[in-house]
Image: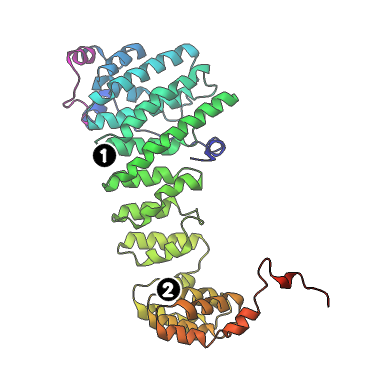
Amino acid sequence: MPERRGASRRIVVILGGAVVLSATVLGVKLGLFGARRGGPGALACRVAVDEKSSLTDLGEALRNSDPRALAVLAQRLTPQPAATPSAVSDREAGEWLATLAGLRTGYLGFNGPGRALAVTVACRILDRLGVEPAPARWIAVLPPLHDLLEAAMADSDPGARVAVLGEVSRLWGWLPGRSLTPAEENTLADWKDRLYPPLVRCLGHTDAPTLVAAVACIGAIPLDGAASAALAYHENEHPAVRRQTLVSFARRTTLLTDDMLLKHLHDPDPAVQETANLILKTRGFTQEQISLGGLIFSPKPQQRLSIIPLVKDRDDLDPVVWLLQLSRDPEEMVRLSAIEALAAHKTPAVRRRLAEMARSDQSDAVRKAAGKLVPSTQETTASLPPLPGSPSLNPKAN
């Protein structure tokens, strides 16, 4: 991810909330008490855990993949309404770090819903250590959290993948509540950089939920170069993925172009059509312009042909732009009609396009029609500037 260190440190963090449930109810709702791979030690820890357990006890239980400990910790980290979280001391930071280490060790022992919850809990520990003024040991949270996030992005369970992608999407702008040294800034930026490769690999999945979450996560990266990895998914087979791509790149006009949006006005899915229409309006297009633009990208040649008489004499838009677009239409009859309309415009761009069509269009009829409107070969050659090194650049005196 080139150039992204500085940008990733300047984005405002918006933290999501969570639903308050008791530890037991949370475990039942998510199916955390189902089959898992923990051994006898896990059972012993589970019996000893309750809502008053210390972080040390919870960390040991999590190390053995105890789902009750995970549910208790999730409840403890749930933001309370109208409550301002208190800062963490260095001593408390050590306890939280030990709890996170236990969670990372026991991660694979949880079932699918448990692993999804573990990701959320781990990121809430990061948030907890980031409360201003963040303790000096905040940076120690990064290595174990990275390991857990990377494992979750490669998880076989779609629910775990979706959960981690949702969390990572907000981490691009995460900052601790303290002034950072240059070394800390570099460490944090490098940490975010290392999340990018496993994230891009998530685009290789074929299930719609993972792809939607991956596109949203990559689209949240503040740098165009890195975010562009997900742009091609605006043509994905899943309508939900196409729609998410449009939403994620709606404000990135250099990546998601107006032409790309106009094509989606003919998307087979009505929700994608409506999303494209809405984004075009937010970009300043009138409904009439959207309708005209939609005709250019209609899959029906007759509709594309119908736009030429509608735009060729307009003075509230640039008809040359529209006609040049239509001059590249795959249908011969559309290109011929565009040539006829372009004859009334003598701009350099029109002359270049007509010369190109006269020279290389695949249709003999189009080449002849364009050739009648361009200067002869001799006139074109005579108008060209001399080549570098030509004697005409250095005329001799008589």
Q: Is residue 376 above or below residue 201?
A: below
- Disc number for residue 158: 1
Residue at the (43%, 62%) spot, across then down: 260
Query: Does the magenta segment cover residue 206?
Result: no
Residue position marked by numbered label 2 in the rendering: 296
Q: Is residue 235 above or below residue 33?
A: below
Decide if residue 382 is on the left or right side of residue 110.
Answer: right
Q: Is residue 115 above or below residue 391?
A: above
Residue at the (46%, 57%) spot, across then down: 256
- Give the structural element (helix, strand or loop) at label 1: helix
Q: Earlier in the sequence, mark 2 or mark 1?
A: 1
Mark 2 in CB contact with mark 1 (< 8 angstroms): no
**Quadrant of the rendering where the C terminus is positioned:** bottom right
**Residue 152 locus on image (x, y percent):** 31, 32
Query: Does the magenta segment cover residue 44?
Result: yes
**Residue 196 locus on image (x, y percent):** 42, 38
Q: Is residue 216 above or below residue 386?
A: above
Magenta part of the chain: 31-46
- Residue nearer the viewer, 16 or 357: 357
Q: Amino acid at mark 1?
A: Pro
**Residue 349 locus on image (x, y percent):** 58, 74
- Disc number for residue 76: none
Check disc 1: other Cα within 10 Å, few if <14, some if 14-19, many if 20+: many
